Each structure stands twice: as structure tokens, then as C-alpha cells.
Amino acid sequence: MGNAPSEDDSSPSGAKRAGRWRVVRLAALWSLAALLAVFTVLQLLPYGRDHSNPARHTEPPWDSARTRELVVGSCYDCHSNRTDWPWYSYVAPASWLVTDDVHRGREALNFSLWPRVHEGEEAEVEDIFEVVLDGSMPPRNYTFAHWDARLSEHEKQELVEGLRRTFARAGLAVGGEAEGE
């Protein structure tokens, strides 16, 4: 049956094939057992298990409900203290990647720490708009698992314009000028 040699193949070449087939099966089983053991040991490592959402959460003065909807749907999991931790964020090594993405995202831009949402120079506020428009935010690895976070070209424009108005409303420098200058 199939391509596997039969157990009662008594010819010398048939016996060699049967012996090789057994070695391949044994090697595959040992490899599978080793991978399962490594996967099990990885679950014991503590990194990637901290799925805390800091208590502090202050909403920006959104210019509209639509801007808030776009930000919450596409940005909040990594850029706020309101992360929704999916099931795979509890399984190593995916948990390591998700935890790292959230920590780096919160460090770069955290809408929950309003009005101090962004660390750094005012010029970097423009970078927020650029990464949305060029499609690098939200990143592909995120939108692959979160289809609802994908933004159409029109939604990208809506989001950027809404964030510009929200930041200007708060008096944050956007494009080199703060509101009232």
C-alpha cells in the first residue's frame, strides 16, 4: 500500500528499502518528539507572560467619534493601556513577539497617557501620519491576525486627518505649528 515498502518484501533491494524507510520513520518520530519537548520547555519560560494593562488611561480629546473608532480598531492593542490580549499571546514563542510589540508600541506612542502620548521631538508627530499613510502601521503581522484592523486608503486618510485635528485641538505641534500660533 502506498510508497512504503511492504514488511514481507524478501528481495535484497526490498529489504534495503524497508530498512531505510524504518530509519526515516524513526528519525521523523524522534524529531517530532524533540520539537514537542522544546515547545513544552518554552512554555515554562516567564518572558511574554506579563499581559498587564496599566490602570492609567486617559482619552485624547478626539475630534470625532470616527477618529476614535479608527484608532481603537487599528491602533489601541499596541498603542494604549487597553490591549486585548489574544489567545496566542499566551503561547511561546508567539507570546514573546506580541509582548515585545506591545511594549515597543506603548513606548513609541501611547494614547492612554494623554496628553503625553508621544516621547520625543515634535517632528516625530509627523512620523505618526507617515507610517499610517505608507501602510507600515498597523503592521502586516498584526493585520494578518486582525483583519478588522486593516485600513483602506480612504480610512488611512480619515485617520490621519482626524489625528491631525485631535492633536491640534490639544495644542500639540503638528507640521511645525501648534494651535493658536
Image (tube, grey):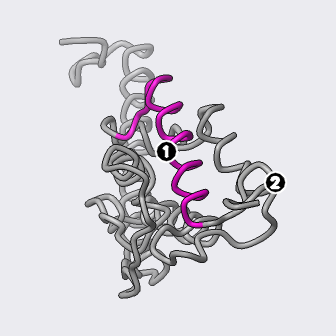
**Residue plotted at (62% across, 33% down):** 133
Residue 102 vs 147, above or below: the answer is below
Where residue 32 appears, as percent x and y from the top left, is: 38, 50
Residue 161 vs 153, above or below: the answer is below
Q: Where residue 176 is drawn, which disc sits there?
A: 2
Asked if residue 168 is among those painted magenta in the image, a careful observer would answer yes
Give whichever of 99, 169 is nearer the camera: 169
The amino acid pointed to by label 2 is Gly
Please provide the residue range marked out in magenta: 149-170
Name which quarter of the figure residue 95 lies in: bottom left
Where residue 69 appears, as percent x and y from the top left, is: 32, 48
Determine if residue 34 is in view.
no
Residue 100 vs 88, above or below: the answer is below
Rounded to the nearest angstrom, the CA distance separating label 1 from label 2 is 17 Å
Mark 1 residue crowding within 10 angstroms, few (<14) / some (14–19) / many (20+): many
Number of numbered markers? 2
Quadrant, the N terminus = top left
Mark 2 residue crowding within 10 angstroms, few (<14) / some (14–19) / many (20+): few
**Residue plotted at (37% across, 80% down):** 53
Quadrant, the C terminus = bottom right
**Residue plotted at (73% across, 49% down):** 126
The amino acid pointed to by label 1 is Gly
Q: Do callouts 1 and 2 mark residues in contact (Cβ within 8 Å)? A: no
Q: Which residue does the numbered mark 1 point to in the structure image?
A: 162
Asked if residue 48 is among those painted magenta in the image, a careful observer would answer no
Where residue 46 appears, as percent x and y from the top left, is: 45, 84
